[in-house]
Amino acid sequence: MILLDGKATSNQLKEEIAASVKKLKLQGKKTPHLAAILVGTDGASMTYVNSKVKACERVGFNSTLIELPSETTEEQLLNEIDLLNKDVDIDGFIVQLPLPKHIDEQKVLMAVNPDKDVDGFHPVNVGKMTLDLPCFLPATPYGILELLERYNVETSGKNVVIIGRSHIVGRPMSILMSQKRKAGNATVTVAHSRTKNLKELCLQADIIVAALGIPEFLTGDMVKEGVTIIDVGITRVDDATKKRGYRLAGDVHFESVSKKAAFITPVPGGVGPMTIAMLLQNTLLACQRN
Ligand code: GUN
């Protein structure tokens, strides 16, 4: 079993990005600048956004964090987005999800200038991705492709089962892996809450992407020998033995599944750090385009 080490791979990527930033600076060019909007005080979202800001510092980017209270109205948020759209120093920005229930997420994502949409969530970028045109790829699927490529995991002609059809992970992942690309050319099945024969599908899969958000859902009896496992889940599960009161659990029961897997991502330290690295990669691209 080979661990797909997202932490080490993302560190390598960040070094490559830092080298590019150094070069830009030496050439007297603009320093990449990423902004993030966080609405409310959700613990996990605060942790993710802080990690993104810290990663910017590490590679030499400028970063701006805009923290808004949970009572922020949709109109106020749209105003903030408008300011970032118009700010020539900001190369790219993200609105951390989920948003409070009184705010229409779709409306917010559509307000982001597609040229600054480094999350790749705007319909223009989703459309371009679907058509294989240059665009910002959504960071989590992009990070998974990068991890598969860097570990030379064969995907061509393989059976891939993606569990989960979210707009952020499952759906784009299914599109990307079916395309003609290095980590692509796969035969993809998208499974979801209404799928009837999930265990049989998983037992035939060469690669499984678990992105449904249920801790330790995928167990050893559901996978075949030699499978490649990508665990996108990261849920806080109460654990009184831990100082912070919780542990982080993936969607995969690591102990039983890893015994049969050829390649597997750990949680934490797998897909999570790759997502942040690819957001930086998109921001660098946005800056170079400007
Ligand atoms: N919430 C969970 N994943 C993401 C992500 O990739 N981007 C943003 N903006 N919010 C998220």
Image: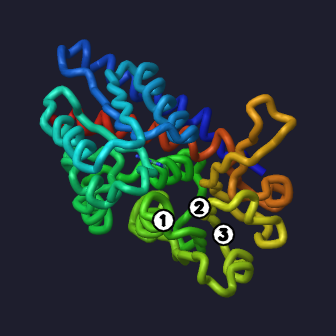
Disc 2 to disc 1: CB gap under 8 Å: yes
Q: Position of residue 218 (x, y in %)?
A: 74, 65
Which amino acid is tagged 1? Ser
Residue 266, placed above or below residue 194: above
Determine if residue 15 is in view. no
Q: Position of residue 242 (x, y in %)?
A: 81, 34
Identify the residue at image location x=40%, y=40%: 39
The quarter of the picture where the C terminus appears is: top left
Identify the residue at image location x=51%, y=35%: 46
Determine if residue 259 is in view. yes
Residue behind mark 3: 206
**How many labels sit on residues?**
3
Where, by quadrant of the figure, is residue 126 drawn? Answer: bottom left
* Dot 3 or dot 2, earlier in sequence: 3
Residue 68, placed above or below residue 230: above
Which amino acid is tagged 3? Asp
Element at badge 3? loop
Crowding at label 1, few (<14), some or many (≥20) Cα neighbours within 10 Å?
few
Crowding at label 2, few (<14), some or many (≥20) Cα neighbours within 10 Å?
many
Mark-to-mark CA distance, 2 and 1: 8 Å
Q: Which mark is residue 211?
A: 2
Residue behind mark 1: 166
Mark-to-mark CA distance, 1 and 3: 21 Å
